[in-house]
């Protein structure tokens, strides 16, 4: 190869590398942002430790433990480390590969003719070769971009796993407390049923009522006992679910808090929904999938171009290891190469088209994820608004139900109303109590949902590569 042709080849390599390193911007998604979100104020809400808003030391301790001990989260951390190792290899692969070969040998030979003396000889040789190799130059930047997107996607996946795990932990904790509240309500319901049962039995004994009325109330008492037993088993099952998240036997798990009333109810703060692009791990992951697909298109496109490689080496050879360093014989070689596959029955063209279709699918998934994220926000905010308005109504309804049963018991004892009116008042009170408890738990879960919809305080610009 002449010097001029070598220069032209190096210029071609440089231009190709610069072209391969260029990254086209991702498509704008302004059309997917709801218009009424555009004027929202910027905020840094929720915080990464959003669970502290419930003012529960026990919940905060559980969140710390589950992040340290959950097996699924540990698997995600290992997957992230694997992706990091691949990225490190891809980063080194961007640069020429150093080549160093050293060899030394000693040869000994001896012979003795039939009528002669024994003679021997010994020879030494040593060689040293150093150089660099730079193969498949055009494709390396795209492979690095793909590895980089894969690692960043693993970061986002780990954040998404952690966010879902923390949300599940909070919801399971709320379920335990909710069931304990239901148990206390069931105990009160049982007390009420037994009180009315004693009144009913007294009136049956007095001949005012028939034994059928007493039997109906006994059935009601037994129903409340059965409900209480079922709730206790549900509470145990909920604790078992929480123990699985903490990777420990349920018998070792002790939840000290006894009621949802001990938890604060956080208020929803402001935030800029367009920041979902950096706050939600699933959106970041969808964007990175798109970047990886775009890099694959570049790899498939470069497969249609000649493969450019460059090898440079310098070597020296000596008949003695001691003389290797002082040997003045030095051989230098420079070997640029350009290879092109001619016939492959259209395989590379089909691979490029397949990569392009995969990129279009990744773009569609990206848009879908963004739209779903904004919809999640809308639904979560609507749920919180509805549950807040229902809370006052349900509390007022519970107060009326308690007063209604009190009046019904008094009038029933006095013989003014029949047993069916008392039975109806009981059922209304039981339903009202459960409604208040269910609404409280639903509100707490809705707050967790809005935290998750906003990414739980995670931000892409805070991720670390280690």
Image (cartoon, grey):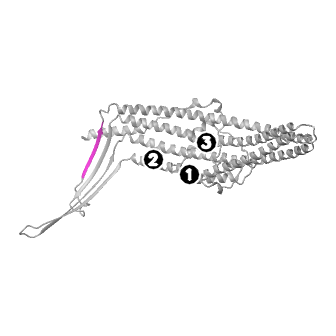
Q: Which residue is mark 2?
A: 87
Mark 3 burial class by Cα count in 10 Å: few <14, some 14-19, many 20+? many
Q: Which residue is mark 3?
A: 455
In the depicted structure, whether residue 213 falls above or below residue 324: above
Which of the 4 image quadrants contains residue 384?
top right
Work out whether residue 181 can be spotted: no
Magenta span contains residue 62 = no
Magenta segment: 331-340
Q: Nearer the viewer, residue 94 or 205?
A: 205
The furthest residue to the bottom? 117
In the depicted structure, whether residue 178 falls above or below residue 374: below
Marks 2 and 1, how far apart at CA = 25 Å
Marks 1 and 3, how far apart at CA = 22 Å
Residue 81 place in picture, x, y as percent:
49, 50
Q: Main secondary structure of the magenta part?
A: strand
Q: Which residue is mark 1?
A: 71
Work out whether residue 171 can be spotted: yes
Left-right relation of 233 to 220: left
Q: Nearer the viewer, residue 375 or 204?
A: 204
Marks 3 and 2, how far apart at CA = 25 Å
Between circles 1 and 3, the one closer to the viewer is: 1
Magenta span contains residue 339 = yes
């Amino acid at each position: 190869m002449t010097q001029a042709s070598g220069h032209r080849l190096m210029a071609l390599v440089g231009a190709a590398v610069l072209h391969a390193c260029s990254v086209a911007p991702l498509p704008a998604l302004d059309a997917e942002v709801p218009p009424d979100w555009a004027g929202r104020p910027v905020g840094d809400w929720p915080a990464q430790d959003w669970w502290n808003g419930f003012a529960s030391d026990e919940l905060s301790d559980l969140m710390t433990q589950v992040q340290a001990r959950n097996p699924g989260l540990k698997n995600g951390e290992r997957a992230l480390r694997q992706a990091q190792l691949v990225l490190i290899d891809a980063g080194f692969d961007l640069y020429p590969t150093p080549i160093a070969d050293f060899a030394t040998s000693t040869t000994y030979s001896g012979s003795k003719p039939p009528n002669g003396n024994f003679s021997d000889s010994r020879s030494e040789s040593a060689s040293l070769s150093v150089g660099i190799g730079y193969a498949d130059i055009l494709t390396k930047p795209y492979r690095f971009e793909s590895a980089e997107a894969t690692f960043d996607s693993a970061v986002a996946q780990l954040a998404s796993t952690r966010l879902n795990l923390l949300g599940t932990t909070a919801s399971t904790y709320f379920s335990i407390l909710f069931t304990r509240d239901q148990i206390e309500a069931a105990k009160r319901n049982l007390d009420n049923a037994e009180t009315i049962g004693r009144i009913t039995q007294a009136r049956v004994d007095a001949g005012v009522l028939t034994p059928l009325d007493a039997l109906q109330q006994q059935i009601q008492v037994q129903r409340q006992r059965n409900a209480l037993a079922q709730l206790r088993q549900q509470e145990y099952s909920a604790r078992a679910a929480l123990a699985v998240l903490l990777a420990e036997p349920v018998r070792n798990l002790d939840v000290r808090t006894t009621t949802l009333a001990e938890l604060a109810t956080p208020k929803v703060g402001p935030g800029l929904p367009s920041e979902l692009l950096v706050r939600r791990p699933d959106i970041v992951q969808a964007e990175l999938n798109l970047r990886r697909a775009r890099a694959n298109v570049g790899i498939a496109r470069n497969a249609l171009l000649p493969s450019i490689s460059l090898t440079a080496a310098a070597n020296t050879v000596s008949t003695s290891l001691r003389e290797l360093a002082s040997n003045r014989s030095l051989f230098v070689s420079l070997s640029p190469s350009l290879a092109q596959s001619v016939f492959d029955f259209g395989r590379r063209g089909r691979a490029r088209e397949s990569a392009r279709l995969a990129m279009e699918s990744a773009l569609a998934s990206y848009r879908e994820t963004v739209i779903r994220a904004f919809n999640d926000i809308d639904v979560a905010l609507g749920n919180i608004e509805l549950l807040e308005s229902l809370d006052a109504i349900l509390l007022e309804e519970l107060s009326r139900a308690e007063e209604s049963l009190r009046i019904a018991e008094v009038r029933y004892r006095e013989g003014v109303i029949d047993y069916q009116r008392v039975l109806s008042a009981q059922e209304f009170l039981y339903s009202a109590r459960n409604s208040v408890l269910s609404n409280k738990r639903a509100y707490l879960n809705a707050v967790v949902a809005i935290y998750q919809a906003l990414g739980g305080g995670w931000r892409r610009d805070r991720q670390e590569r280690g």
